């Protein structure tokens, strides 16, 4: 008697995929959210560049009337909000959100909906900021200091748009940080102890905790500003129990922390790329990670470095100077270890490495020039001059733009399965380098020697800064061209670049074990992690097995 | 802009120290980067050495960096304290000022600086001070935050609502020093300029007396007009 036939499993076909925009809008996969954050951030970078160009055009010649004072202040405010809240922080978080779960061997994040809400809150913030063109864009400056940002002095809704936009984005960053911190705490693969965690994932953990501290501080400040402006609050009004300096403390804690966040992310990305392209492990891994933690703590504690001309006690000024100068130790150690990593290595200067080295050089120049801004009496001269513009831009453009592009070139093959065009990358790098040097070095002279002030919509003929400003404007144009070349390179290579392998660069962390681009579940199987260089272990195991299974070669000369 | 007061001198010295330190750092790091990237490039065909660190070297580098930071910290305090010192009024200065610095109030208001002299005279835009005399500027504001900034004479300081901030300087040479405001204060921020005219003590005395008489005359005239207006109406 024959057994009854089992019912066949009939596959009618996979459910039809929903339209692409619905997939993008509803996905909570960390890779989709990471890509959304990165793409959004790069889009806002492009907008910020247009604003920078308009301002530099206004400042190309003395007493120019290309932009009205109000228009200039609006460009300035939009530029400040865009570069910090809509470009640098989301770019950093995007890379963390995409790469960290892969590096720790997780199949996703712990609280994916939180990350998803966070990313869309950032998009909402950006939309609110630019929707303000429908009424009035903000005009209270890069950091809208109270009481200028109060209704008594700016009664239109520009500052409200700023507060809503940055508030939404900051709330989003905090939610993403909660998800990342939880993921890194709970979802590490078997054997992935903290001491074996890749540097970039360490940075993700450090930055998440940093954001959990500074994000709520900024949210509190923004809420207080909103209450002041709309509900007769007195938080930042003097004389009725409030204090204008309160805004400065709260906002500078956030801005200093954000500055450190960008530096930590960039340094960590560089510390991933340099060992890969030197064929060596990171020199003194533990010291580098410890230094990143130190930067987060010390750098944020130096917030009063921004308030050295304000009426605060001299003791606090020395405290700020001590914290700023203490940064020399961790940053110097990282510099030493990166250079020591390359010593004795086999350095391949491919596009990611080129951008990483450039990023490090610019961060070094920027931070070294910030040094004078922390020497109290010197800061009394340099503060709010274009010298500060130059130092901050070199460090942050070095970190967020050069460092971000290094990360982009490095992980682009993982994200898309394609590599970015190498020669276009090199042209873009050198254009950006020349542009950044031309755009910012002259401002050191204009600010440090001639005292040209920051944020001003015009400067006067006969103050000795005409040539500096003209060169800076030309430099800004060159820099923009260079950046746009890389943005175009990314767009073109997404579908048209040369196909990439799964382990494109010979990296040592687990993201190179996944396919390029990774499957939605990231990994089919996971190896036990036994060292800080799991991919190297895997490669060695494969080579070992291949050797074992190959029959030993026969002696060529038979023994007589 | 060359400094023209003892405080601004100290600031410039500290600035040079910072500049030299920064240059050292940049040259060391960028130089080392370029050197190793060139020397150890893969094309030379050597197998990369698999070394992962050295604890002793790390401690030494860390200690050296710590010493470097500590030296800068001490220098920073020394020169800041010198820049903060209240300079003594010299022999060519205003004798009437005596041991105390001459107190002038600088008021920031959108978008003008107002100066109030000890004898109730006041001036807008232009501050007149006697040469070789210690001057204390008390910075206040009637509206938003303004930063008084005349780099040749002193470091800048913020005038914050509800607070009084202080700048002490002694101008060593007669002349006109220009400056302005260094914190975004709204639309006409860039046009909020100021000028410090350093004159001989006699000229200073004459200036404040003339201002005082002029202001008094103008006030008397206003009072007179009001009174006559009332008389006419009544």
Image (cartoon, coloured by chain):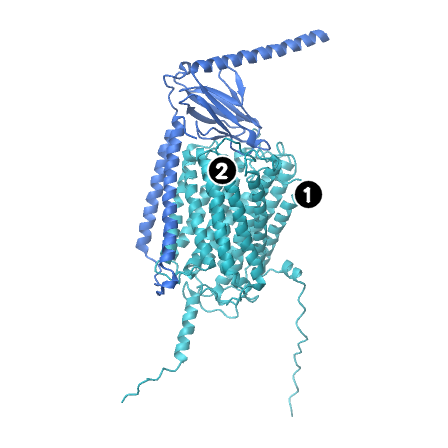
Q: Which tint is chain A?
A: cyan
Q: Which tint is chain B?
A: blue
In depth, the one of A187 and A298 nearer the eye is A298
Residue A527 location (% of width, % of height) = 46, 69
Residue in the image at 58% along x and 58% along y: A491
Q: Which residue is mark 2?
A: A467
Residue B200 appears in the figure: yes
Residue A556 location (% of width, % of height) = 33, 84
Disc on the earlier residue, 1 or 2: 1
Q: Secondary structure at mark 2?
A: helix
Outermost residue toward the left in this view: A560
Q: Secondary structure at mark 1?
A: helix
Cα separation, mark 1 vs mark 2, equals 37 Å
Q: Callout 2: 10 Å neighbours few (<14), some, many (20+)? A: some
In depth, the one of B232 and A75 nearer the eye is A75
Chain where mark 1 sits: A
Chain where mark 2 sits: A
Q: Is residue B89 above or below residue B187?
A: above
Q: Callout 1: 10 Å neighbours few (<14), some, many (20+)? A: few
> Which quadrant holds residue A542?
bottom left
Q: Is residue A181 above or below residue A64?
A: below
Residue in the image at 53% along x and 70% along y: A524
Q: Which residue is mark 1?
A: A134
The numbered disc on residue A216 is none
Find out whether the residues at labels 1 and 2 contact each other: C-beta distance under 8 Å.
no
In depth, the one of A210 and B79 nearer the eye is B79
* Location of the N terminus of chain A (image quadrant): bottom right
Residue A426 location (% of width, % of height) = 48, 56
Residue A105 location (% of width, % of height) = 49, 64
Residue in the image at 37% along x and 45% along y: B25
Nearer the viewer's eye, disc 1 or disc 2?
2
């Amino acid at each position: 008697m024959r057994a009854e036939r089992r019912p066949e499993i009939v596959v009618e076909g996979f459910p039809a995929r929903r339209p692409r925009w619905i997939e993008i809008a509803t996905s909570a996969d960390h890779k989709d959210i990471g890509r959304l954050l990165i793409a959004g951030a790069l889009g806002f970078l492009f907008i910020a560049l247009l604003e920078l160009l308009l301002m530099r055009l206004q400042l190309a010649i003395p007493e120019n009337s290309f932009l009205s004072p109000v228009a200039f202040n609006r460009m300035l405010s939009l530029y400040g909000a865009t570069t910090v809240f809509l470009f640098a922080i989301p770019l950093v978080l995007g890379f963390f959100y995409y790469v960290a779960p892969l590096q720790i061997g997780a199949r996703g994040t712990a609280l994916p909906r939180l990350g998803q809400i966070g990313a869309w809150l950032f998009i909402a913030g950006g939309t609110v900021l630019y929707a303000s063109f429908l009424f009035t864009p903000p005009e209270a400056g890069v950091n809208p200091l109270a009481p200028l940002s109060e209704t008594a002095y700016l009664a239109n809704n520009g500052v409200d748009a700023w507060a809503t936009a940055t508030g939404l984005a900051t709330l989003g960053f905090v939610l993403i940080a909660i998800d990342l911190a939880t993921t890194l705490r709970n979802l590490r693969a078997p054997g992935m102890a903290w001491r074996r965690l890749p540097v970039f994932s360490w940075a993700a953990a450090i930055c998440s905790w940093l954001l959990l501290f500074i994000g709520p501080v900024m949210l509190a400040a923004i809420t207080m500003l909103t209450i002041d402006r709309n509900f007769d609050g007195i938080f930042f009004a003097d004389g009725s129990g409030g204090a204008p300096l309160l805004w400065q403390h709260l906002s500078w804690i956030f801005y200093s922390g954000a500055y450190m966040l960008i530096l930590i992310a960039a340094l960590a990305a560089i510390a991933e790329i340099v060992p890969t392209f030197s064929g060596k492990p990171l020199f003194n891994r533990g010291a580098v990670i410890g230094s990143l933690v130190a930067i987060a703590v010390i750098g944020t504690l130096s917030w009063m470095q921004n308030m050295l001309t304000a009426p605060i006690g001299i003791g606090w000024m020395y405290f700020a100077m001590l914290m700023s100068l203490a940064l020399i130790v961790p940053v110097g150690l990282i510099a030493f270890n990166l250079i020591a990593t390359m010593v004795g290595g086999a350095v391949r200067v491919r596009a990611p490495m080129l951008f990483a080295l450039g990023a490090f050089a610019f961060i070094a120049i920027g931070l070294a020039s910030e040094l004078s801004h922390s020497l109290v009496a010197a800061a009394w001269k340099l503060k709010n001059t274009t010298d500060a513009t130059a130092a901050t831009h070199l460090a942050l453009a070095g970190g967020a733009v050069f460092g971000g592009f290094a990360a982009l070139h490095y992980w682009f093959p993982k994200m898309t399965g394609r590599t970015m065009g190498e020669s276009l990358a090199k042209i873009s790098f050198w254009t950006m380098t020349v542009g950044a040097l031309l755009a910012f070095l002259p401002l050191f002279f204009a600010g440090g020697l001639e005292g040209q002030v920051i944020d001003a919509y015009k400067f006067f003929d006969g103050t000795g800064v005409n040539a500096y400003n003209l060169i800076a404007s030309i430099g800004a144009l060159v820099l923009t061209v260079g950046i746009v070349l890389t943005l175009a390179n990314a767009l073109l290579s997404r579908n048209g670049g040369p196909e990439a392998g799964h382990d494109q660069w010979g990296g040592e962390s687990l993201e190179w074990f996944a396919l390029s681009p990774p499957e939605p579940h990231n990994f089919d199987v996971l190896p036990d992690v036994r060292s800080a260089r799991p991919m190297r272990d895997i490669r060695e195991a494969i080579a070992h097995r291949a050797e074992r299974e190959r029959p030993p070669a026969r002696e060529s000369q038979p023994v007589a | 802009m060359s400094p023209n007061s003892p405080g601004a001198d100290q600031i410039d010295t500290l600035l040079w120290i910072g500049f030299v330190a920064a240059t050292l750092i940049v040259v060391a790091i960028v130089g080392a980067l370029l050197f190793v990237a060139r020397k150890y490039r893969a094309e030379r065909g050597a197998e990369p050495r698999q070394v992962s660190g050295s604890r002793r070297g790390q401690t030494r580098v860390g200690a050296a960096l710590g010493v470097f930071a500590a030296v800068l910290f001490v220098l920073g305090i020394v020169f800041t304290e010198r820049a903060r010192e209240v300079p003594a009024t010299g022999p060519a200065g205003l004798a009437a000022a005596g041991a105390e610095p001459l107190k002038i109030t600088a008021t920031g208001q959108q978008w003008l600086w107002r100066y109030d002299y000890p004898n109730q005279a006041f001036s807008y835009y232009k501050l007149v001070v006697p040469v070789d005399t210690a001057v204390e500027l008390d910075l206040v504001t009637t509206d938003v935050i303004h930063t008084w900034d005349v780099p040749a004479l002193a470091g800048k300081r913020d005038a914050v609502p509800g607070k009084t901030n202080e700048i002490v300087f002694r101008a060593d040479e007669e002349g006109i020093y220009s400056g302005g405001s260094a914190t975004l204060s709204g639309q006409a921020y860039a046009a909020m300029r100021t000028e410090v005219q350093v004159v001989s003590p006699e000229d200073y005395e004459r200036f404040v007396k003339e201002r005082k008489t002029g202001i008094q005359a103008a006030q008397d005239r206003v009072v007179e007009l009001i009174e006559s207006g009332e008389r006419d109406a009544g």
